[in-house]
Image (tube, helix red, strand yellow):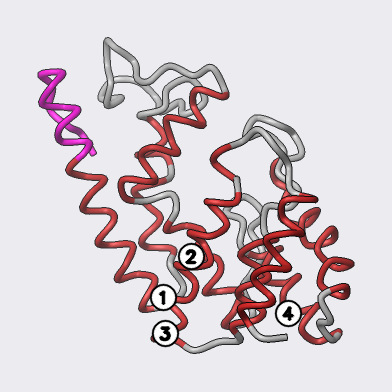
Amino acid sequence: MDLESLTRSLEADFARLAPKGDAGHDVHHARRVRDNAFRIADREGGDRAVLLAAAYLHDLVSPPKDSPDRSRASALSAEAAAPVLRGLGFDEDRVAATQHAIHAHSFSAGVETTTLEARILQDADRLEALGAIGVARTFYTAGLMNSAMFDADDPFAADRPLDDRRFALDHFAAKLLKLPATMKTAAGRALAEERLGVMRAFLDAVAAELGVAPVW
């Protein structure tokens, strides 16, 4: 199956199977991860059919951020992807390669990426947490969790522990600003550093509007 036909089939499978009601993990997110993965693959190589399928299916099971099952989401998604992949005509090697990329992409799962495609997918998904879109997704997710935007008395946690379950702004220091250092490909790191600059400019603007010094 050519990539264009595969894309149409994956779009249909996503519409049929993916969870509804979370704009942070909707088809537009899947498409952006696909585009990020292909952008990285332009420099790094990799099996584009595997990358394409993994991009569309990596959040096939997506529990809420505060769910106890959240750390198992990528394993559950990999399991759910197998019959879809076989239905698309993937041979067992490609099924296994796509499942590994899906399982290993998650930050919370802590699975070692043992293939180029897994490294690319992980980088492509983490790019979604950076830059202007990363800012938007952070506050969108905080809204779903009923978290505050920031601690009005100490927005940059200068004199308190970070708590990104209570305050969306804390998530930048707790996780997001660290992501570029975790990128597994050179192309992914370069893109991450660009988006980190956008994110730091946002934090500087928040600090200026609040009249405080940014700690991070």
Residue appearing at x 46%, y 25% in the figure: 163
Pick whichever of labels 2 and 1 is earlier in the sequence: 1
Instruction: Tell me the mark number nearer the camera, choosing from 3 and 2.
Output: 3
Report the Cα–Cα distance between label 3 and label 4. Answer: 19 Å
From the viewer's perspective, is the residue at label 2 or at label 1 nearer? 1
Write down the region rendered in magenta: 202-216
Q: Residue 124's mark?
A: 2
Q: Quadrant of the C terminus?
A: top left
Label 4 residue SS: helix
Residue visible at 21% across and 38% down in the picture? 202
Q: CA distance from mark 3 to mark 2?
A: 13 Å
In the rendered structure, find residue 39 and report the number of the disc placed on it. 1
Indicate which disc, 3 or 2, sits on the residue closer to the N terminus: 3
| Mark before the other along the chain sequence, 3 or 4 | 3
Q: Is residue 166 above or below residue 181?
A: above
- Magenta span: predominant SS is helix
How far apart in space, not on screen, are marks 4 and 1 (Cα)?
Answer: 19 Å
Disc 3 + disc 4, Cβ < 8 Å: no
Q: Which residue is mark 3?
A: 42
CB-based contact (under 8 Å), mark 3 and mark 2 = no
Q: Secondary structure at mark 3?
A: helix
Q: Amino acid at mark 4?
A: Ala
Q: Decide: is 18 above or below 122.
A: above
Q: Position of residue 84 (x, y in %)?
A: 84, 66
Dot 3, crowdedness within 10 Å: few (<14), some or many (≥20)?
Answer: few
Label 1's element? Answer: helix
Is mark 2 in CB contact (under 8 Å) with mark 4?
A: no
Q: CA distance from mark 3 to mark 1?
A: 5 Å
